[in-house]
Image (cartoon, grey):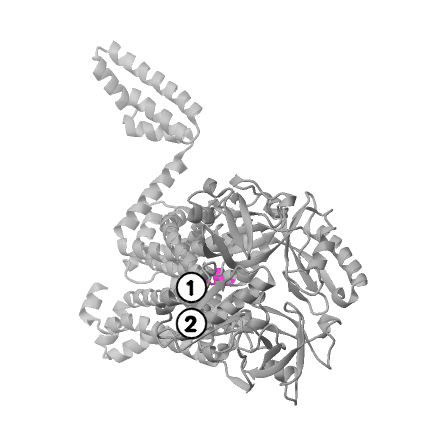
Amino acid sequence: MRRLRAWLVRFGGLFGKRRRARELAAELESHLQMHIDENLHAGMSPEEARRQALIGLGGIDQTKESYRDRLGLPWLETLLQDIRFGLRILRKNPGFTVVAVLTLALGIGAATAMFTVVNGVVLRSLRYPDADRIVAIDTRFSDSGHEIPRVTGGDLQDLRGATDSFAAFSYYDGGGMGVQVNGGADFGGVYQVDSDFFRVFGVSPGVGRTFAPGDAGRSALVSAGFAESNFGSDSAALGRPLGIEGTEYEIVGVMPPMFQFPPEAQVWAAVSAVPENTNRTAYNYRLVARLNPGVSPKVADARLSSVANSLAAAFPDSNRDKSFVVEPLQEQLAEPVRTSLLLLMAAVALVLLIACANVANLMIARATVRARELAMRAVLGAGRWRLVRQLLLESVLVAFAACLLGIVLAMWITKGLLILGGRFIPGPLLADIQFDWWVLAFALAALFTSFFFGIAPAWQAVRLNLQNAINSGGTTGVLGGGPSKLQDSLVVAQIALSLTLAVGGGLLFRTLMALHSSPLGYRTDGILVTYASAPARTLAEALQDARGFDDLFARLRKAPGVVSAAGAMGLPAGEYGSNGSFAIEGKQSFSGDPRQLPSAGFRLASPGYFTTMGIPILRGRDFSGSDLYNRPFVAIVSDSLARQDFPNEDPIGHRIMCGLDSPKWMTVVGVVGDVRQSSPAAQPGPELYMPLQQHPFMASDTEVVVRTPDSPQTLIPAVEHAIRAVNPEIAVRFTTMTELVSDSIGAQRFRAVLAATFAILALWLALSGMYAVMSYVTAQRTAEFGLRSALGAQRGNIIRLVLGRAVGMAATGVLAGTLLSIVAGRLLSSMLFGVTSLDVVTYAIVIGIVVPVIVLAAAVPAWRASRTDPMVALRYE
């Protein structure tokens, strides 16, 4: 009795009815005690009295059933019963269960991994206090609609006066450069920032302090990684000196690992709040600010518009048609990769839909094969809702198992995505890519996909024809052709969606191939690139470093295995470079409105650079050793600049002036071939080359290029030894031209590889869907094929009969997929290079692969059906 009472209390407590359970338990105890007392008075022993009392109540099981009903919980019991039955059914059909779970898990895993990246990069706020108030300020030109994420020094000073919208306002400038530390030199991400920079982000150093107003040119903060690698620990870095461009700074603080802005920053050097260059034509500075509480970006935009209007009136030559735009910093960082990630998220969502359709087909086939079982359950009293619930529960169980496996797969897939795409995702956003509650919620939401593939067979169960089902014996279709039509529709949808993904992946892959085969205008094989940063500050030091680089090039040309060596600032696909406007003597005035002047990329080069890089000299001469700082300035122009600004005349002998460092008239002495400067996807444009020796301050950061017939990496020890011999304080970093060009198309490679992977996965799912449907159809028509064979039908006739249906589904799917691909191709048009969104070759290749593969998936069951033994088939029926 105590055991029965305890069970009742536990059962009621499990479903939140503990009080009612206790009342029933007391009633049960009283009722049993009354029967026991009666039996005792009749002369029974205590044990016999209790036993007979329970028998009088119908036994323990019947008593439990009675009290479950009185608790009002019979539906919970039937639900648990259905779950147990569903688990037993899935366990008895391991083939179906494994295929369904793996299929869904692949879709859920891929979708969850892609969502993890999108969530960290696009949806999630930066990991700083009140990150939604941190904004960047860009310059927008209303006449062209062009927008750049920089401002001029003069505009910066005036914008700082609009601080009624901002709680903190700062600028930064810098990049990769040499750092002299611990008696040596190394490359690092070095940025010059003013004292308000860290207030914008609301982040304090992990050790030490931030900048004070008097720290300009004297103090620096370093990252935790920089402190660890150079000094052993954060605290050991405090008070230590480091050199940047000839200036010695003292480390006053170490930033925590979570602070990664700008993305590649390792050292932040304090500079004055007044920028060094205050003109209104050089866009050298990036602005960040923290909005005051309650101030929205739109309100700040309005305030900056007022400032822009005032500046346009005061400085019409430089500020006419110019305005300033406030943009959330997170959006600015995500902008370069947002479109690609959202596109890939849409692609993987299609993969998930295809997986759902695939499992829906499997569930329909299973439900149809189980038609007799469902009919018998209906005859025995099971209502339609009970049958529907049973099938939906089985779907949910499959989805739950697939979700758990998909989460595990997503962790691995996410790591692969970060390895493949981490090089072009900004560091502050890369750190936010992690599994969190939002990601888990997305994965668990995939449980709702159970309705996508569970509703269809459940709906067929509602329409069950009991008489046909019982008479069929489970060997033929019993739902009036309904499942076949639905299955065909699902297969057509899979083919259409997979074809769309395949065409998209094909266009992106052909874009990648076009980029690899694009004529660059320079050679990439056999060239070692060395970034070399010299710590020059004064003109004398800069001239000495420039002469040192000339000596270095001469040493390297004599080294074994070296064909040629030279230097540049502004290497194609490299990190350095500049651009701006220039004036041609007799045609333009350099002191006028810079927007009325032609523009070009500004590059520096040493003698022999064009030969080393394989850039042809079309007219005139190369730079020579006599093109020194104290000699007349010269320049070489690209063919595009010559055709654009010197139509129908020879540019050689003309003089040009630009604002690179010290504006002087330069005589054009040569014309060289065009190059694709930023990447293979960039169109060749006007370029202006100047001698390294005549621009020593810009030449302090030089890209040394060495050509060899062997592997470029074999030259690294010799080059490093030669540089240390010239100046041990020069920081160096090595790469190759092949790697630079490859990195410049990293985003295109990421898109192409993932799109191709998703397309292959989708095609495999469509293939398995077609195979499953045709296998089911041929199994259902076994007797028919046996009868046809008995009546004289040849194997070829039966194969054509089966394949005819498959070809019809494939043709419909290909037609629908082609129409979808045309629409999707237009969305991809901005990402394509060397190929159009309606590229006939891509469509032909994809269709030429998809159709035979899909038909082949149907051919296997068709061939199996053609070998049906008539006697076996008819006896089976």
The quarter of the picture where the C terminus appears is bottom left
- In the rendered structure, are the residues bearing label 2 and label 1 in contact, judged by CB atoms less than 8 Å apart? yes
Q: How far from the left and from the top, in percent, is residue 507?
A: 47, 73
Amino acid found under the numbered disc labelled 2:
Arg
> Which of the pair 709/788 is nearer the observer?
709
Q: Residue furthest right?
A: 313
| Residue at horizontal 64 percent and vertical 80 percent from the top | 667
Residue 268 visible from this viewpoint: yes
Q: Characterize the magenta stretch by its predominant secondary structure.
A: helix
Would you say residue 542 sits in the magenta stretch?
no
The magenta region covers 343-347
Q: CA distance from mark 2 to mark 1?
A: 10 Å
- Which of the two residues, 513 or 393, is positioned nearer the viewer here? 513
Report x, y in % for residue 793. Answer: 25, 79
Give percent across and percent down for residue 622.
Answer: 53, 81
What residue is pinned by disc 2? 555
**Residue 632 sits in which quadrant?**
bottom right
Q: Which residue is mark 1?
A: 725
